[in-house]
Image: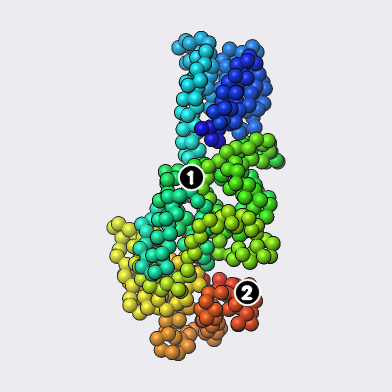
Amino acid sequence: MGESLNILVIDDEPAIRQILAATLTKAGYAVESARDGGEALGRLGKGDIDLAICDIQMPGMDGIEVVQQAKSMGIETIFLMMTAFASVETAVKAMQAGAYDYLTKPLRKENILHRLLQVRDVIALRTQNDALRNLVREEDKQRCRFTSPPMVEIERLIRKVAPTDFTALITGESGTGKGIIARQIHQRSQRAGELFIPVNCGSIPENLMESEFFGHVKGAFTGADKAKKGLFLEADNGTLFLDEIGELPLALQVKLLHILEEKQIRPVGSEKFRPVDVRIIAATNRDLKEMIAAGNFREDLYFRLNVFNIHIPPLRQRREDIPAMVEFFLHHSRMAGPGRRAWMIEPDAEAALLHYHWPGNIRELENVIERAMILAENGVITMQDLPGVVAGNNARASSGAPGATGTLRERMRQYEIRAIHEAIEEAGGDRRAAAQALGIGLSSLYRKLELAMPPPLFSD
């Protein structure tokens, strides 16, 4: 198989170019040809050729000069040289110029295809190393063991879908851990040894999205001074996690649908499609069916993505998971670890965490614990170390009194937040319905909740 390998055949003899190109094309590779060194360097300059099979003995510029000039231009193409002179001297010169290996004429089909498999492995390793340097990959944390029935069911669903190659759509409110679920699916899949690349669709400027996703060739647009693979080729044979898929513009939705159906992409500025083998996992905190009705999301793409749905309920609907998560964060936070103090939490502080509504879900809980660990004395978290909105909520639950403290403005703020949380809970988690019941706009409700939350330390 010649997946994701662009090859340029360079030889001054038309018959050799045609025969070799036909052989490689039949084997599944994308093949172009050049009749001399000048034409070859012009094509290589676009930056999207993975492998050049180049004759050494050519009139004018010979193959070794082609390699030297390509390297001086910063072209990262791998070179396999062809020579009719099976001499050590020729091989050494080719290697010194930067060639990967050389082949002896007359060429044997089996030998060529075997070498190409080796080259593909080299390119895959190089791509993986580059991606590892450019991506900030979280260290895999020990998994928190959930006990609530909804999370036990999600664990079962992960075990079922992970070994397959189906696309999956993970839904749930912001901060519920959709990225963690996506990573678990990848780690239990047959692609676990390849890259897992997360991308937030809402964080990429719209004018750069196509280049970021599909890559571009050199000179495709102003500022494209070198070729770029793009996220789909970076994740080839691995998993691409598209978080906040609802933020993807309609034009990109069409292209994503094409990739899911055709398994190929076309870099910006290129006329050739390149095959890709990528598993897609998507996630959103938005109602995609509402977006479809409003004309903001393609129904055909929704059905392609929603082959297997995993819905994560909000933390307020599975409070029995909170103690395990608190214990997990106390032992695995940046302030915990070997040689550091053991952390404890007082019963009334833990009760406050259990009674709070957690509009920011797991992400908010983690932030609250991190903040409390900074404030705590002697490794013991008390009520005084918790944010007022969390501690005040427990005081009200315990005594029936408002439980607000501080200035009048602070007390009013605490009362307002409690009223919003109660309205959300009464509405079954539907924030739009809660806002309507309170007589405020949905954006106002979100703004008031955000003001009450600590800034996030980690994203989904």
Examine the rendering and report whether any part of residue 180 can be seen: no
Q: Residue at x 60, y 46 (%)?
A: 261
369 and 4: which is toward the camera: 4
Tell me: residue 157, above or below residue 78: below
Residue 165, compared with residue 53, is above or below; it is below
Q: Residues within 10 Å of mark 2 (few under 14, many from 20)?
A: some
Q: Is residue 449 above or below residue 278?
A: below
Q: Is residue 21 left or right of residue 195?
A: right
User: Residue 132 appears at what percent x and percent y?
Assistant: 47, 43
Numbered circles on residues, count:
2
Query: Which of the colour schemes (rainbow, by chain, secondary structure, one colour) is used?
Result: rainbow
Look at mark 2 in the image and give the residue it sits on.
442
Name the residue: 50% across, 69% down. 360
Determine the residue positioned at 54% across, 78% down. 427
Instruction: Give the label on residue 238, or none.
Output: 1
Q: Which SS class for mark 1? A: loop
